[in-house]
Image (spheres, helix red, strand yellow):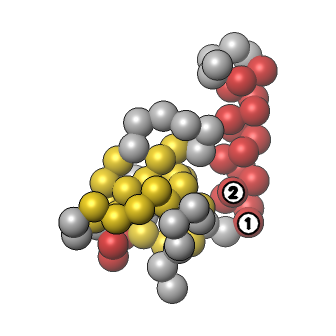
Amino acid sequence: MKPPVGGHAVDTTTGRIGIVMGREGPYVRLRPYGGGREWDCAPDAVRPATRTERLRAATAFENARGRGEVL
């Protein structure tokens, strides 16, 4: 099952968690949780993020924001 646009996904080649922004040619476009530069990922290297992975990404973002690393 591929994650839908707006869903949380894991790029299995890097382990990064992102939000599916759409598809560009043969690739899936992911954006880091909390914003940032999008990246392309091969469709066969994308899987839905687990609840634990989504929580971990949200916690990391909030911690960075609390340290002033994220605006």
Mark 1 residue type: Arg
> Which residue position holds label 2?
54
Q: Does residue 31 appear in the picture of this structure?
A: yes
Q: Is residue 12 above or below residue 62?
A: below
* Position of residue 27 measured from the top left corner of the image (x, y, whole percent): 28, 64
Task: Count up the numbered dots.
Answer: 2
Q: Residue at x 55, y 37 (%)?
A: 35
User: Which residue sits at x=73%, y=66%?
Assistant: 51
- In the image, 4: left or right of 63? left
Would residue 38 appear left or right of 20 to someone viewing this image? Answer: left
Quadrant containing the C terminus in the rendered view: top right
| Residue 5 badge | none
Q: Which mark is residue 51?
A: 1
Please tell me which residue is depicted at 75% across the width and 29% down the height of the picture: 63
| Residues packed near mark 2 inside 10 Å, few (<14), some (14 to 19) or many (20 plus) | some
The answer to whether residue 15 is visible is: no
Say above or below: 40 vs 68: below
Q: Marks 2 and 1: CB-CB under 8 Å?
A: yes
